[in-house]
Image (cartoon, helix red, strand yellow):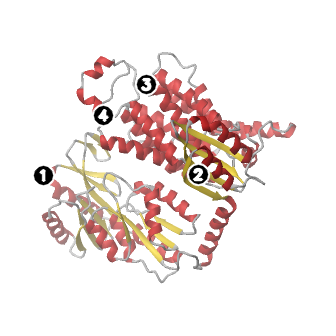
Amino acid sequence: MPHALDAQAVRNWCRLSLAALGQAREEIDAINVYPVPDGDTGTNLYLTVESATQQVEALFADRPARPARPAAATQADDAEDPDDAARPSTGSALRALAHGALLGARGNSGVILSQLLRGIAASVADGPADADALRTALRRAAEAGYEAVARPVEGTMLTVAAAAADGVVHLPADCGLDTVAEGAYEAARAALALTPSQLDVLGRAGVVDAGGRGLVAVLGALADAVSGQSPMGPLALGMRPAVDPVAAHAAHAAHAALAADQHLQATPPVGVVGGPAYEVIYLLDAVDGKLPALRARLDALGESLVVVGGDGLWNVHVHVDDPGAAVEAGIEAGRPHRLRITHFASAAASASALGAVGATGAQAGELGDQRAVVSVVQGEGLAELCRGCGATVLHADPDHAPSSAELAGAIRLTRAREVVLLLNDAELRAAAGAAADQLRDEGVRVAVIPTRSPVQGLAALAVHEPGRRFDEDVVAMTSAAGATRYAELALAEGESWTMAGVCQAGDVLGLIDGDVAVIGSASTTAATAAVVLDRMLAAGGEMVTLILGDGTDAALADELVAHVRRSNPVVDTVVYRGGQGSSPLVIGVE
């Protein structure tokens, strides 16, 4: 029986896409040369998908997921379960995905991606999300993307989207949804490798299209999601290859040969040399009838015009020399809001100046000369510990990781020009990188220390010295964090394969440096923690830190302190009541 794309698969698609773009963000930024070489395509795509993910997660927070149902299920089957009406459907999940992307779209690539997602949502919202529906959705997405761009250019993410749709046309009629999704991903990869031969600026730079690279990551995430891959599964989505190296080499060779004989028949790049000075983006409340005149006026004003959306809400993106005129055009059409204007030269100069300040250690600027540390923690006990060490605290919810916007907001509140960001969670690295890139353009220097546990964050804070040069302080804090091994106890939510064997729901898992090392039962929690401690101290250590989670009995700490005294009498042990909800016990060994 064929698989169907259900609401939970859409949720997993969001999470996997965000993880993939987080891993590839810096790589995509680095190859961003078209239409403007401002090095932010990866960040813009990440922020766009982050917004989409937040909308989908909000939908699930209100209603539980509808159980997976085969594509052959009928309306009568649906009627058998009266609770289905209260659960997210595939259509509602896809609409939330598209709406979130529309609201949070950043840059040229993010705006186009939001329209591609809108095309998918519009195509499958009222029908069964099976293999045929996905074929149709991919075609509609590509068409929607081309329709949104005033002057489409080949060799971009539009080309990759069209190739994904073309690549599944000739698959067997009876193939499954997972086969179609995988076929779209492979076709997109092949098309991405050819983009340097289609767009001269890419060929000269020796790179593939940055927006297309991001789209391949999203399509890879879709293939993983419909095949049942979980965001917490054993496969690293970021390891999916974006470009076939052999195909890429062949494409570059063909491009070089063609360029030697004739000029490429590709549209000249815009906004690279002598292009418009400003990027203008805004959301627009306007009736559909106002859009043709708006598009015509903005197209006459500038370049890289993309207008996406529908049903009265639009996202407008354009590069112009007169940002005021672009905004006035929006006012004439409706109500612009969430306006963002970027001066390309100023943004580049800000980043360059910030790098120069970092090299010289100079301090100046409107934000003041002070330095700040922002620490992301769960639990009021941990928050008080960090505040006592001079840090600004950003509270994290066990069920909701802070977004890049929330991280950036916490940093802005410090009003500091130099900020050290302690994540205390490996899952926040991508969001932190995106936040740091946004703040760099505002003249704020952010050093992200990728602490994976609050014990590493506390170790870093212990050696923080504001009087040192910024770089020296960051090195000292990073070294202290890296010298601290970390472990934690967690409860298994279901049956799963781990590095230590098979666990069942309710088992107590002992994780060392992020990997499951011990599996115990709820009745042997202290014994499990003791085994974890023994394994950590076998490699040496001078101090053990125990942080008790919300609701954890203090007797557990007493047993472990006594155990350390018996087995390692020269090792000191300190205990804190952290109050974190994600783990009953966090362990650090320095």
- Which residue is found at the position 17% from the left and 60% from the top? 552
Q: Amino acid at mark 3?
A: Asp
- Picture coordinates of residue 389, whole percent (x, y): 35, 77
Side of 338 where 493 appears, left or right: left
* Circle nearer the N terminus (1, 3): 3
Q: Amino acid at mark 4?
A: Arg
The residue sitting at the front extreme is: 332
Side of 37 where 219 appears, left or right: left
Q: Can residue 187 be seen from the camera position used here?
A: no
- Which residue is found at the position 50% from the left and 31% from the top? 120
**Residue to which mark 1 is pinned:** 523
For residue 485, the mark is none
- Check disc 1: other Cα within 10 Å, few if <14, some if 14-19, many if 20+: few
Pick the quarter of the image with the C terminus: bottom left
Side of 431 where 139 appears, left or right: right
- Say which quarter of the image contains residue 128: top left
For residue 87, the mark is 4
**Residue to which mark 3 is pinned:** 126
* Circle nearer the N terminus (3, 4): 4
- Which residue is found at the position 39% from the left and 34% from the top? 92
- At mark 3, the secondary structure is loop
Contact check, label 4 and label 1, Cβ < 8 Å:
no
Above or below, 582 relative to 369: above
* Circle nearer the N terminus (2, 4): 2
* Circle nearer the N terminus (1, 2): 2
- Which residue is found at the position 61% from the left and 47% from the top? 330
Side of 451 where 184 appears, left or right: right
Q: Amino acid at mark 1?
A: Ser
Above or below, 518 relative to 444: above
Q: Amino acid at mark 2?
A: Glu
Return the residue nearer the eye: 557 or 412.
412
